Image (cartoon, grey):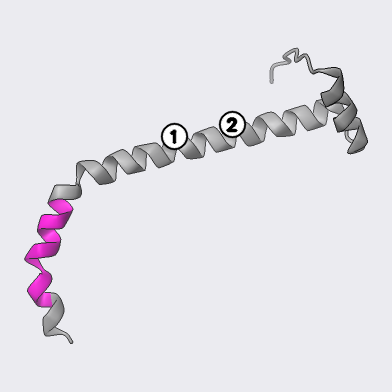
């Protein structure tokens, strides 16, 4: 673990206190949530790029099996 120093505005500190939370715990939770969101966004972007990169191939495969899909109806 590493300790970092974070400066918050007085209004932010007052808001945290109004929630009856301690600054340290609140800040740690907020940072962890932001990191998780950024990781999800990064993964979403990678998946989007991957789907776009294989779009042509996926469409070709779908077209190849189009007639087989109708045989089972």
On the rendered structure, is 33 left or right of 9? left
| Residue at image location 44% in from the left, 34% down from the top | 42
Residue 2, given in percent of the width and then of the height, sits at: 69, 16
On the rendered structure, is 35 left or right of 6? left
Is residue 61 shown in magenta?
Answer: yes
Is most of the magenta stretch helix, strand or loop? helix
| Residue at image location 7% in from the left, 64% down from the top | 64
- Front residue of 10 and 24: 10
Magenta residues, as a range? Answer: 57-68
The numbered mark at residue 25 is: none
- Marks 2/1: CA–CA distance: 10 Å
Which residue extends farthest bottom?
73
Residue 40, given in percent of the width and then of the height, sits at: 50, 40
| Callout 2 secondary element | helix
| Callout 1 secondary element | helix
Relative to 54, does residue 63 appear above or below in the rendering?
A: below
Which sits earlier in the primary sequence, circle 2 or circle 1? Answer: 2
Is residue 67 shown in magenta?
Answer: yes
Relative to 27, does residue 68 appear above or below in the rendering?
A: below
Q: Look at the image and tell me in which quarter the N terminus lies.
A: top right
Q: Look at the image and tell me in which quarter the C terminus lies.
A: bottom left
Q: Residues within 10 Å of mark 1 (few under 14, many from 20)?
A: few
Q: Quadrant of residue 30?
A: top right
Residue 58, given in percent of the width and then of the height, sits at: 17, 54
Q: Which residue is mark 2?
A: 35
On the rendered structure, is 52 left or right of 3? left
Q: Which residue is mark 1?
A: 42
| Residue at image location 75% in from the left, 15% down from the top | 6
Q: Quadrant of residue 37?
A: top right
Residue 49, given in percent of the width and then of the height, sits at: 29, 39
């Amino acid at each position: 673990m590493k300790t970092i120093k974070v400066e918050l505005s007085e209004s932010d500190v007052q808001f945290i206190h109004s929630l009856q939370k301690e600054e340290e715990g609140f800040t740690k939770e907020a940072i962890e949530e932001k990191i998780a969101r950024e990781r999800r966004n990064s993964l979403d972007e990678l998946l989007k790029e991957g789907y776009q990169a294989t779009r042509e191939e996926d469409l070709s495969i779908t077209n190849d099996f189009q007639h087989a899909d109708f045989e089972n109806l």
